[in-house]
Amino acid sequence: MPQPGKETGIGRDSASPIATIGVLSLGLLLPVGAGPLTDRAVALLTSSVEGQTKTITLVRNGQAEPVRTRAATVSELLTEQNIRRTSEDALDVDPSSPVADGETIAYRAPVSVTLVVDGVTQTIQTSAETVGDVLEHARVAFDSHDRLSPAAPASIVAEDTIRINHVNSWVEQVRRAVPVPVEHRLSFDLAIGRVKIVQKGAPGQRLISYRVTRQSNRSQAPRQTVIASRITQKPRPRVIAAGVGEYGAFAKFAQAGFDRTVRLAQAAMSMVATAYTANCYGCSGTTAMGQRAGHGIVAVDPRVIPLGSRLYIPGYGQAVAGDTGGAIHGNRVDLGFNSDADAMQFGRRSVTVYVLHP
Protein backbone atom coordinates (compact mmCIF):
# COMPACT_ATOMS: atom_id res chain seq x y z
CA MET A 1 0.00 0.00 0.00
CA PRO A 2 1.36 3.48 -0.81
CA GLN A 3 1.82 5.84 2.06
CA PRO A 4 -0.86 8.53 2.47
CA GLY A 5 -0.08 11.77 0.62
CA LYS A 6 1.99 10.11 -2.09
CA GLU A 7 0.94 9.69 -5.75
CA THR A 8 1.19 6.30 -7.44
CA GLY A 9 2.59 5.91 -10.93
CA ILE A 10 5.58 4.91 -12.92
CA GLY A 11 8.92 6.00 -11.51
CA ARG A 12 10.17 7.13 -8.12
CA ASP A 13 7.98 9.18 -5.77
CA SER A 14 10.60 11.75 -4.78
CA ALA A 15 13.76 13.30 -6.12
CA SER A 16 17.05 11.71 -5.14
CA PRO A 17 19.97 13.60 -3.53
CA ILE A 18 21.83 13.20 -6.79
CA ALA A 19 19.00 15.00 -8.58
CA THR A 20 19.25 17.80 -6.03
CA ILE A 21 22.93 18.16 -6.77
CA GLY A 22 22.00 18.27 -10.46
CA VAL A 23 19.72 21.19 -9.81
CA LEU A 24 22.51 23.10 -8.06
CA SER A 25 24.78 22.39 -10.99
CA LEU A 26 22.21 23.68 -13.44
CA GLY A 27 21.82 26.82 -11.40
CA LEU A 28 25.56 27.43 -11.55
CA LEU A 29 25.59 26.86 -15.30
CA LEU A 30 22.82 29.37 -16.04
CA PRO A 31 24.28 32.83 -16.59
CA VAL A 32 22.94 35.73 -14.58
CA GLY A 33 20.44 37.83 -16.59
CA ALA A 34 19.88 35.08 -19.14
CA GLY A 35 16.22 36.09 -19.33
CA PRO A 36 12.98 34.20 -18.55
CA LEU A 37 12.76 30.54 -19.49
CA THR A 38 10.05 29.22 -21.76
CA ASP A 39 7.39 26.90 -20.34
CA ARG A 40 8.97 24.01 -22.20
CA ALA A 41 12.41 24.82 -20.76
CA VAL A 42 10.98 25.06 -17.25
CA ALA A 43 9.25 21.72 -17.73
CA LEU A 44 12.48 20.07 -18.87
CA LEU A 45 14.45 21.58 -15.98
CA THR A 46 11.76 20.39 -13.59
CA SER A 47 12.02 16.96 -15.11
CA SER A 48 15.73 16.82 -14.41
CA VAL A 49 15.11 18.04 -10.87
CA GLU A 50 12.79 15.11 -10.31
CA GLY A 51 15.21 12.59 -11.74
CA GLN A 52 13.39 12.44 -15.12
CA THR A 53 10.03 11.87 -13.41
CA LYS A 54 7.20 13.91 -14.92
CA THR A 55 3.50 14.30 -14.26
CA ILE A 56 1.37 14.54 -17.38
CA THR A 57 -2.35 14.29 -18.15
CA LEU A 58 -3.23 11.40 -20.44
CA VAL A 59 -6.64 11.66 -22.08
CA ARG A 60 -7.43 8.11 -23.13
CA ASN A 61 -10.61 7.65 -25.17
CA GLY A 62 -12.03 10.84 -23.71
CA GLN A 63 -11.15 10.03 -20.08
CA ALA A 64 -8.44 12.19 -18.46
CA GLU A 65 -6.08 10.73 -15.86
CA PRO A 66 -2.83 12.01 -14.25
CA VAL A 67 0.22 9.85 -14.99
CA ARG A 68 3.71 9.87 -13.42
CA THR A 69 6.30 8.77 -15.93
CA ARG A 70 10.02 8.71 -16.66
CA ALA A 71 9.41 8.24 -20.39
CA ALA A 72 11.56 10.51 -22.52
CA THR A 73 9.24 10.45 -25.56
CA VAL A 74 5.53 10.07 -26.19
CA SER A 75 6.16 6.71 -27.83
CA GLU A 76 7.84 5.44 -24.63
CA LEU A 77 4.93 6.78 -22.58
CA LEU A 78 2.44 4.79 -24.67
CA THR A 79 4.55 1.67 -24.20
CA GLU A 80 4.57 2.25 -20.43
CA GLN A 81 0.76 2.48 -20.53
CA ASN A 82 0.46 -0.74 -22.57
CA ILE A 83 -0.96 1.17 -25.52
CA ARG A 84 -0.18 -0.41 -28.88
CA ARG A 85 -0.76 2.05 -31.68
CA THR A 86 -2.36 1.10 -35.00
CA SER A 87 -2.87 3.03 -38.22
CA GLU A 88 -6.49 3.78 -37.27
CA ASP A 89 -5.91 5.30 -33.83
CA ALA A 90 -5.57 9.01 -33.05
CA LEU A 91 -2.77 10.79 -31.22
CA ASP A 92 -2.63 14.56 -30.94
CA VAL A 93 1.19 14.79 -30.77
CA ASP A 94 4.13 13.35 -32.66
CA PRO A 95 5.09 10.00 -31.05
CA SER A 96 8.78 10.94 -31.24
CA SER A 97 8.32 14.26 -29.43
CA PRO A 98 9.75 14.55 -25.88
CA VAL A 99 7.43 14.36 -22.90
CA ALA A 100 7.29 17.63 -20.93
CA ASP A 101 6.14 17.86 -17.35
CA GLY A 102 2.58 19.18 -17.04
CA GLU A 103 1.52 18.65 -20.66
CA THR A 104 -1.67 16.93 -21.84
CA ILE A 105 -1.55 14.09 -24.35
CA ALA A 106 -4.73 12.76 -25.98
CA TYR A 107 -5.02 9.26 -27.41
CA ARG A 108 -8.06 7.59 -28.89
CA ALA A 109 -8.23 3.93 -29.83
CA PRO A 110 -10.21 2.88 -32.91
CA VAL A 111 -13.65 1.32 -32.50
CA SER A 112 -15.81 -0.69 -34.85
CA VAL A 113 -18.62 1.30 -36.51
CA THR A 114 -21.25 0.22 -39.04
CA LEU A 115 -21.68 2.73 -41.86
CA VAL A 116 -24.77 2.48 -44.10
CA VAL A 117 -24.55 4.77 -47.15
CA ASP A 118 -27.63 4.80 -49.42
CA GLY A 119 -28.44 1.25 -48.34
CA VAL A 120 -24.89 -0.12 -48.74
CA THR A 121 -23.44 -1.43 -45.44
CA GLN A 122 -19.80 -1.57 -44.43
CA THR A 123 -17.96 -1.97 -41.13
CA ILE A 124 -15.02 0.33 -40.48
CA GLN A 125 -12.48 0.94 -37.74
CA THR A 126 -12.31 4.58 -36.73
CA SER A 127 -10.89 6.77 -33.98
CA ALA A 128 -13.04 9.75 -34.97
CA GLU A 129 -14.90 11.44 -32.14
CA THR A 130 -18.10 12.50 -33.96
CA VAL A 131 -20.38 11.24 -36.73
CA GLY A 132 -19.29 14.11 -38.96
CA ASP A 133 -15.62 13.19 -38.46
CA VAL A 134 -16.33 9.57 -39.38
CA LEU A 135 -17.97 10.60 -42.67
CA GLU A 136 -15.15 13.02 -43.45
CA HIS A 137 -12.48 10.37 -42.86
CA ALA A 138 -14.49 7.87 -44.95
CA ARG A 139 -14.77 10.51 -47.70
CA VAL A 140 -18.56 10.45 -47.68
CA ALA A 141 -19.89 13.82 -48.84
CA PHE A 142 -22.94 15.17 -47.04
CA ASP A 143 -24.76 18.40 -46.28
CA SER A 144 -27.88 19.66 -44.53
CA HIS A 145 -30.19 18.34 -47.29
CA ASP A 146 -29.13 14.72 -46.75
CA ARG A 147 -30.85 12.46 -44.18
CA LEU A 148 -28.29 11.56 -41.52
CA SER A 149 -28.69 9.58 -38.30
CA PRO A 150 -27.30 10.22 -35.72
CA ALA A 151 -26.65 13.93 -36.32
CA ALA A 152 -23.18 15.05 -37.39
CA PRO A 153 -22.14 16.45 -33.93
CA ALA A 154 -23.09 13.22 -32.10
CA SER A 155 -20.25 11.38 -30.32
CA ILE A 156 -19.08 7.97 -31.48
CA VAL A 157 -18.97 4.82 -29.34
CA ALA A 158 -18.11 1.24 -30.24
CA GLU A 159 -20.66 -0.67 -32.37
CA ASP A 160 -22.49 2.50 -33.41
CA THR A 161 -24.47 2.47 -36.67
CA ILE A 162 -24.41 5.57 -38.89
CA ARG A 163 -27.01 5.85 -41.63
CA ILE A 164 -26.95 8.41 -44.44
CA ASN A 165 -29.28 8.71 -47.43
CA HIS A 166 -28.24 11.29 -49.99
CA VAL A 167 -30.95 13.63 -51.24
CA ASN A 168 -30.43 14.83 -54.81
CA SER A 169 -33.59 16.89 -55.35
CA TRP A 170 -35.44 19.35 -53.13
CA VAL A 171 -37.42 22.61 -53.22
CA GLU A 172 -36.01 25.91 -52.00
CA GLN A 173 -37.88 29.17 -51.51
CA VAL A 174 -36.17 32.54 -51.86
CA ARG A 175 -37.59 35.99 -51.21
CA ARG A 176 -36.58 38.72 -53.64
CA ALA A 177 -37.21 42.43 -53.51
CA VAL A 178 -39.51 43.87 -56.17
CA PRO A 179 -38.08 47.19 -57.43
CA VAL A 180 -39.96 50.36 -56.77
CA PRO A 181 -41.86 51.38 -59.92
CA VAL A 182 -41.67 55.02 -60.91
CA GLU A 183 -44.70 56.96 -62.09
CA HIS A 184 -44.23 60.28 -63.87
CA ARG A 185 -47.09 62.72 -63.87
CA LEU A 186 -47.51 66.08 -65.49
CA SER A 187 -48.73 68.85 -63.24
CA PHE A 188 -50.27 72.15 -64.25
CA ASP A 189 -49.75 73.33 -60.65
CA LEU A 190 -45.95 73.31 -60.96
CA ALA A 191 -43.90 75.83 -62.90
CA ILE A 192 -42.27 74.67 -66.09
CA GLY A 193 -39.15 72.63 -65.30
CA ARG A 194 -40.02 72.07 -61.61
CA VAL A 195 -40.16 68.54 -60.22
CA LYS A 196 -41.88 67.34 -57.06
CA ILE A 197 -41.89 63.90 -55.39
CA VAL A 198 -45.53 63.19 -54.59
CA GLN A 199 -44.94 59.73 -53.10
CA LYS A 200 -41.65 58.15 -52.01
CA GLY A 201 -42.64 54.59 -52.80
CA ALA A 202 -41.53 51.30 -51.25
CA PRO A 203 -40.22 48.01 -52.68
CA GLY A 204 -42.37 44.91 -52.71
CA GLN A 205 -41.49 41.28 -52.16
CA ARG A 206 -41.63 38.22 -54.38
CA LEU A 207 -41.49 34.59 -53.24
CA ILE A 208 -39.72 32.31 -55.73
CA SER A 209 -39.76 28.51 -55.46
CA TYR A 210 -36.89 26.58 -57.04
CA ARG A 211 -36.50 22.88 -57.75
CA VAL A 212 -32.86 22.07 -56.99
CA THR A 213 -31.29 18.95 -58.48
CA ARG A 214 -27.77 17.58 -58.37
CA GLN A 215 -25.85 14.49 -59.41
CA SER A 216 -25.31 11.66 -56.96
CA ASN A 217 -21.54 11.94 -57.14
CA ARG A 218 -21.68 15.71 -56.49
CA SER A 219 -19.33 16.30 -59.42
CA GLN A 220 -21.23 19.37 -60.63
CA ALA A 221 -22.90 22.33 -58.98
CA PRO A 222 -26.63 21.95 -58.23
CA ARG A 223 -29.05 23.19 -60.90
CA GLN A 224 -31.99 25.46 -60.05
CA THR A 225 -35.29 25.55 -61.94
CA VAL A 226 -38.04 28.04 -61.12
CA ILE A 227 -41.31 26.21 -60.44
CA ALA A 228 -43.37 29.06 -58.94
CA SER A 229 -43.18 32.79 -58.39
CA ARG A 230 -45.66 35.11 -56.74
CA ILE A 231 -45.68 38.59 -55.27
CA THR A 232 -46.35 38.46 -51.55
CA GLN A 233 -46.16 42.22 -51.06
CA LYS A 234 -46.97 44.71 -53.79
CA PRO A 235 -44.54 47.60 -54.26
CA ARG A 236 -45.74 51.14 -53.71
CA PRO A 237 -44.81 53.32 -56.69
CA ARG A 238 -42.62 56.38 -56.47
CA VAL A 239 -44.65 59.23 -57.96
CA ILE A 240 -42.84 62.19 -59.49
CA ALA A 241 -44.75 65.21 -60.74
CA ALA A 242 -43.15 67.52 -63.29
CA GLY A 243 -44.20 71.00 -64.32
CA VAL A 244 -45.46 71.06 -67.88
CA GLY A 245 -42.62 71.84 -70.27
CA GLU A 246 -42.75 72.92 -73.89
CA TYR A 247 -45.63 75.24 -73.10
CA GLY A 248 -46.31 76.02 -76.73
CA ALA A 249 -47.29 72.44 -77.49
CA PHE A 250 -49.71 72.33 -74.58
CA ALA A 251 -51.05 75.77 -75.45
CA LYS A 252 -52.56 74.24 -78.57
CA PHE A 253 -54.53 71.87 -76.37
CA ALA A 254 -55.72 74.82 -74.29
CA GLN A 255 -56.78 76.74 -77.38
CA ALA A 256 -58.78 73.77 -78.54
CA GLY A 257 -60.68 73.78 -75.27
CA PHE A 258 -58.92 70.80 -73.70
CA ASP A 259 -57.15 72.72 -70.93
CA ARG A 260 -59.84 71.92 -68.38
CA THR A 261 -60.86 68.50 -69.65
CA VAL A 262 -57.55 66.81 -70.34
CA ARG A 263 -56.87 64.14 -67.73
CA LEU A 264 -53.23 63.14 -67.57
CA ALA A 265 -52.23 59.51 -67.53
CA GLN A 266 -51.58 58.22 -64.04
CA ALA A 267 -48.20 56.92 -65.10
CA ALA A 268 -45.96 57.94 -67.96
CA MET A 269 -44.23 55.16 -69.85
CA SER A 270 -40.53 54.92 -70.63
CA MET A 271 -40.16 53.63 -74.16
CA VAL A 272 -37.66 53.19 -76.98
CA ALA A 273 -38.59 55.37 -79.96
CA THR A 274 -37.59 55.00 -83.61
CA ALA A 275 -38.57 57.11 -86.60
CA TYR A 276 -40.28 56.41 -89.94
CA THR A 277 -41.78 58.23 -92.89
CA ALA A 278 -44.67 57.50 -95.21
CA ASN A 279 -42.31 56.46 -98.00
CA CYS A 280 -40.13 54.12 -95.93
CA TYR A 281 -39.25 50.70 -97.36
CA GLY A 282 -42.23 48.38 -97.12
CA CYS A 283 -44.58 51.18 -95.98
CA SER A 284 -47.89 51.80 -97.75
CA GLY A 285 -48.13 55.41 -96.62
CA THR A 286 -51.49 54.71 -94.98
CA THR A 287 -51.77 53.91 -91.27
CA ALA A 288 -53.74 51.11 -89.64
CA MET A 289 -56.48 53.64 -88.93
CA GLY A 290 -56.59 54.83 -92.55
CA GLN A 291 -54.68 58.07 -91.97
CA ARG A 292 -51.77 59.41 -93.96
CA ALA A 293 -48.49 58.65 -92.18
CA GLY A 294 -46.45 61.64 -91.10
CA HIS A 295 -45.59 63.85 -88.14
CA GLY A 296 -48.02 63.33 -85.28
CA ILE A 297 -48.90 59.74 -86.20
CA VAL A 298 -47.21 57.20 -83.94
CA ALA A 299 -47.08 53.44 -84.39
CA VAL A 300 -47.68 51.57 -81.10
CA ASP A 301 -48.34 48.12 -79.69
CA PRO A 302 -52.14 48.19 -79.16
CA ARG A 303 -51.75 45.91 -76.15
CA VAL A 304 -49.76 48.67 -74.43
CA ILE A 305 -51.29 51.85 -75.86
CA PRO A 306 -54.78 51.60 -77.39
CA LEU A 307 -55.13 52.87 -80.94
CA GLY A 308 -56.61 56.34 -81.06
CA SER A 309 -55.01 57.44 -77.78
CA ARG A 310 -53.77 61.03 -77.64
CA LEU A 311 -50.10 61.20 -76.76
CA TYR A 312 -47.58 63.76 -75.72
CA ILE A 313 -43.88 63.01 -76.24
CA PRO A 314 -41.30 65.60 -75.06
CA GLY A 315 -39.04 66.52 -77.96
CA TYR A 316 -41.66 65.39 -80.48
CA GLY A 317 -44.89 67.01 -79.36
CA GLN A 318 -48.51 65.94 -79.44
CA ALA A 319 -49.46 62.85 -81.40
CA VAL A 320 -52.05 60.16 -81.94
CA ALA A 321 -51.54 56.43 -81.61
CA GLY A 322 -52.70 55.75 -85.13
CA ASP A 323 -50.58 52.95 -86.55
CA THR A 324 -49.04 49.57 -85.76
CA GLY A 325 -45.88 47.85 -86.92
CA GLY A 326 -44.53 44.33 -87.15
CA ALA A 327 -41.48 45.24 -85.07
CA ILE A 328 -43.36 47.41 -82.58
CA HIS A 329 -43.93 45.25 -79.51
CA GLY A 330 -44.06 46.14 -75.84
CA ASN A 331 -42.56 49.45 -74.82
CA ARG A 332 -41.67 50.48 -78.38
CA VAL A 333 -43.05 53.36 -80.45
CA ASP A 334 -42.33 54.44 -84.02
CA LEU A 335 -42.68 58.20 -84.53
CA GLY A 336 -43.90 59.47 -87.87
CA PHE A 337 -41.95 62.22 -89.64
CA ASN A 338 -42.64 64.15 -92.82
CA SER A 339 -39.15 63.80 -94.30
CA ASP A 340 -36.40 61.23 -94.37
CA ALA A 341 -33.93 63.88 -93.13
CA ASP A 342 -36.00 64.53 -89.99
CA ALA A 343 -36.39 60.79 -89.37
CA MET A 344 -32.64 60.21 -89.78
CA GLN A 345 -31.86 63.08 -87.42
CA PHE A 346 -34.15 61.68 -84.73
CA GLY A 347 -32.68 58.19 -85.04
CA ARG A 348 -33.33 55.90 -82.08
CA ARG A 349 -33.60 57.12 -78.48
CA SER A 350 -35.37 56.62 -75.15
CA VAL A 351 -38.44 58.80 -74.60
CA THR A 352 -41.20 59.28 -72.07
CA VAL A 353 -44.66 58.85 -73.55
CA TYR A 354 -47.60 60.55 -71.80
CA VAL A 355 -51.03 59.16 -72.62
CA LEU A 356 -53.65 61.92 -72.47
CA HIS A 357 -57.29 61.03 -71.96
CA PRO A 358 -59.90 63.65 -72.99
Image: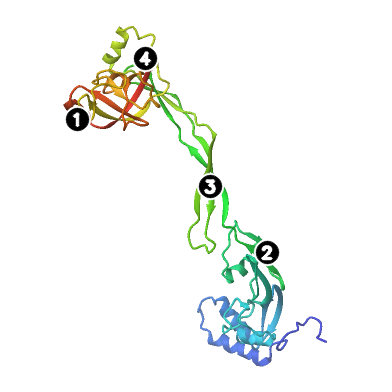
Q: Upstream in the sequence, badge 2 or badge 1?
A: 2
Q: Alpha-carbon neighbours of circle 4 within 10 Å: few (<14), some, or many (≥20)?
A: few
Marks 1/3 in contact by CB < 8 Å: the verdict is no
Asked if one can make out residue 92 in the rendered structure from this viewpoint, the answer is yes
Q: Upstream in the sequence, badge 4 or badge 2?
A: 2
- What whole-number distance in Å separates the C-alpha atoms at marks 4 and 3? 48 Å
- Residue depicted at x 54% and y 33%: 233
Residue at the spot of label 4: 188
Q: Alpha-carbon neighbours of circle 3 within 10 Å: few (<14), some, or many (≥20)?
A: some
Question: Front-most of 349 and 10?
Answer: 349
- What whole-number distance in Å separates the C-alpha atoms at marks 2 and 1? 75 Å
Mark 4: secondary structure:
loop
Marks 4/2 in contact by CB < 8 Å: the verdict is no
Question: Front-most of 125 and 275?
Answer: 275
Q: Upstream in the sequence, badge 1 or badge 3?
A: 3
From the viewer's perspective, is 134 left or right of 204?
A: right
Residue at the spot of label 1: 344
Q: Which amino acid, mark 1? A: Met
Q: Upstream in the sequence, badge 4 or badge 3?
A: 4
Mark 1: secondary structure:
helix
Name the residue furthest left: 341
Q: Upstream in the sequence, badge 3 or badge 2?
A: 2
Q: Which quarter shows the N terminus?
A: bottom right
Residue 265, located in which quarter of the rendered image? top left
From the viewer's perspective, is 147 left or right of 193?
A: right
Marks 2/1 in contact by CB < 8 Å: the verdict is no
Q: Which amino acid, mark 4? A: Phe
Residue at the spot of label 3: 210
Measured from the top left, where is residue 134 in percent x and y? 62, 69
Q: Marks 4 and 3: which is nearer the front?
A: 3
Q: Upstream in the sequence, badge 4 or badge 1?
A: 4
Residue at the spot of label 2: 154
